[in-house]
Amino acid sequence: MADHILVMKNITKEFPGVKALDNVNLQVERGEIHALVGENGAGKSTLMNVLSGTYPFGSYTGDIIYNGEVCHFSTLKDSEKLGIVIIHQELALIPELSIGENMFLGNERKGRFGIDWDRTYHEARTHMDQVGLKESEHTLIKDIGTGKQQLVEIAKALSKNVKLLILDEPTSSLNEEDSKMLLNLLLEFKKQGMTSIIISHKLNEIAYVADRITVLRDGSTIETIDNHDRSVDEDRIIRGMVGRELSDRFPKRERRIGSEIGLEVKNWTVHHPVYTEKVVDDNVSFYVRKGEIVGFSGLQGAGRTELAMSIFGHAYGTGISGQLFIGGKEVHLRNERQAIEAGLAYVTEDRKGNGLILPQTIAVNNTLARLDKVCSGGVIDTVKENLVAEEYREKLKTKTPSVQQEAGNLSGGNQQKVLLAKWMYADADVLILDEPTRGIDVGAKYEIYCIMNDLVAQGKSVIMISSEMPEILGMCDRIYVMNEGRIVAEMNVEDATQEKIMAAILRSEKNEEGA
Amino acid sequence: MNVNVKAFIKKYTMVIALVAVFILFSFLTQGRLLYPQNMSNLMLQNSYVLVLACGMLLCILTGGNIDLSVGSTVCLVGALAAQLMDKSGMNAILVIFICLMVGAVIGGWQGFWIGYIHIPPFICTLSGMFLFRGLGRVILKSKTVPVKNTQFLNIFASYVQIPGLDDAKNRWLPSALIVGVIIAVALLISVFVRRAKKSRKGYAVGPLAPELGKMVVIAALIVYYSWKLAKYKGIPVMLIWVLAVVFIYSFITSKTALGRYFYAVGGNEKATKLSGIDTRKVYFLAYLSMSFLAGLSGLLMAARIASVNGDTGNAFEMDAIGSCFIGGASAYGGSGTVAGICIGAIFLGVINQGMSIIGLDNNWQYIVKGAVLLVAVIFDVVSNHKTGKAG
């Protein structure tokens, strides 16, 4: 019988309105590299947060058996004490502190009076050598690149006496060379007997490094694939990841796509607002016709949100170049106000952070982008404003006792409707919907899809950015696939499959590797 | 019913607290607080707080940002006014115009750095606090400069007296009471006019009783207060200035698109920017208006004290900030009303005045003010936290 260092049994975790994990089982053998794969929202990160104690015991059901014992972790510290260390996708390092200080943050090497700095830096040096990090232990984090920062995180994990290392998307922000180095380091640790769990979208890396692969889909375990002989290829993993059937989760629509073009973008290039030499979107060209829903598929970080926001009055980025045509006419939009006036709407993916003013009422949010429509001489007609909000509440079937309700008190699906209402009221001809159904339940999703169908039926153009491939395939007329700031494929929905989209992404990554 | 009572208490917490404090001090002072002279002074002593609090509200709305330079601006503008009239004998109207413009320029200076260059407001206005206090003292040449220009004093610090109606020999001045009654009646009529207008347009009209009840209470207070004023010199001109500012700011914040933007920026700056609103300009305007009102306060103070010295306006910003937070403005921005901060300012005023009449030591007044402020902000944070959790 196999020696399991970790068994997670029948783990179920619910968030308000969403079942994130449904009876998930995971078995990790001692000394292996175990990969966890699945689409965005499949529950990978949630599962690891349950394991590490970020979601404390009691907030989920099921058992965690580690080294043969049932564990009840209520904080991160509890799991770290037993040698379970998780390294998140967003690195948790303090830029202004040195490598050594970061490695022992919250875990300080104490002397008789305060911190024993000699011991701190001596131990830091030891662990840095283990991971092959050739930097001074006194170097500040902000002065080294992300690849080396990732190594600092691993060295930090080693300093905590790690037995089970969990890496969440460790290579997502690394270049090929750094990724390769990191993966080889994991294989090196494996030889020394360490167990790792790696979460990644990069299936070629998974196939290269993992001994066994567990596939999660919609919060459930689908299968565990054995890869000890490195015989598994990417297609095999993709089949596991996307093998769900499409039933009638999407409302039918009579396609009446006009011949006129609603929005066209030519040679659009955007640079990062802080690291201005970094190209976020590279020479992107696309168009959307009137009455058409165009989907933008890709992994998170592909540059889709940045593309959309940069088009929307340069709300993101610097050094933006390229041409933008709305309704056939070239426009130069320098700020959000001009974009709105040109008939453009951007419905953000982050409705709480960038979309709604949560402490204000639905009515206030509804009119904010076009307050002038309910004003005369700068004075707001509050009665008219309420009538407008009331009208959209009925149209979109927003569930709320009153439009005087604070937006923050609504459920995710209803917040999304308020956000859509706001931009519908802005009379846009071209609507960019960024992850319009993120984090909302199936019923509300269906209603959002219906609204999208209504919009294109009125002759508007809709651009949908989504990381959920079934949704892209179910709703769009045409699909652009983006990866690393470039459009890597364009396909009509009739020709598109999830495998083809995934393959297009992976192919582009391979090309980069070859180049 | 129980729920209604709870909702009522939650909505009118500060009003209830104000009434309680008022009654308390009426007893503690053995009714001296209610003397016409004290009632009249209650407003005059706090005129500057009310004016400054209106400006401070806009700053706080943008995200809990405050303006520390207010007291120094009061000093600088007051000093300028006093020196211009004392040394050059300039016409009072011209002096007022120049001083208000100087206030606006100071506001533009701070607003530019805060709004367009993104200097943190705390630091920018801290610098202003030193800068303008110093400039004020330079203008004063470290002396106390008297304000003797009668035209200037008439504009800010006199009392309204209607010849023929108000006779100085009378024990009371009917004009104040008449004005009070007219305002009260107008307010009551406005309730019905508004309802008629609503139902004519086919909008839903709420129940009459609470709406009218609230207005009857307000009208009664106005009549009561104007009776007190009538028994002591009549309506102070300064009160008219203050009410004008309060009215204008109340209108801006509750009725205009511009006012809405202050709440929006404080509620969610990113969302506001993505809605096509120039958030930099919102910050700029908040600080512009703040210093403009500080300039006006400088004039009011110069007229009321009839002299200006290097310490004029000291710590005024703290009274304004305190009034805002006691009056229910959120320390995180995005919520607060002019009506609320007026109640906050009067609340502080009643405590001040009450304690002064009792003869309580000045130091104790600080202690009480500090405690009251802390309690008010704790209340804001705790109650917000709870509603946040429920959502």
Image: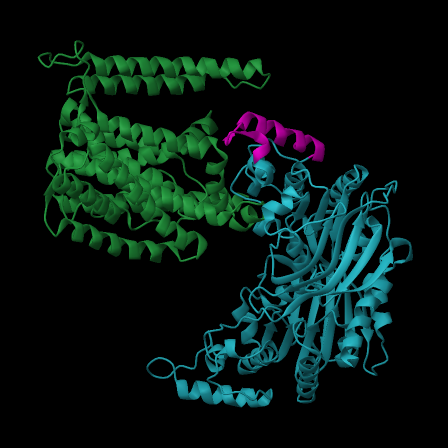
Examine the structure image and report whether residue A262 is included in the region drawn in magenta: no
Residue A436, visible in the rendered structure: no
Q: Nearer the viewer, residue A78 or A175?
A: A175
How many badges with numbers are in the image? 0
Q: Colour of chain A?
A: cyan
x and y percentages locating residue A469 in the rendered image:
79, 57
Q: Position of residue A124 (x, y in %)?
A: 50, 86
Q: In the current view of this chain or complex, which residue is farthest to the top?
A: B164
Quadrant where the C terminus of chain B is found in the figure:
top right
Mostly what secondary structure, the magenta segment?
A: helix
Residue A197 visible to the viewer? yes
In percent of the image, x 58 and y 65: which residue is there?
A53
Picture layout, residue B388 above or below residue B235: below
As drawn, the chain in green is B
Q: Which residue is found at the position 43% from the left and 33% from the top?
A: B252
In the rendered view, tell whether residue A353 sits above or below residue B189.
below
Q: Is residue A373 magenta?
A: yes
Counting from the top left corner in percent of width and height, residue A281 is at 69, 64
| In the displayed structure image, the side of residue A476 where residue B206 appears, left or right | left
Identify which residue, B61 or A192, lies in the foreground: B61
Relative horizontal placement of residue A402, taking residue B219 as reference (left or right): right
Q: Which residues are magenta?
A: A372-397
Left/right placement of residue A474 relative to residue B285 reads: right
As rendered, which of A118 and A481 lies closer to the eye? A481
Residue drawn at point x = 73 percent, y = 50 percent: A325
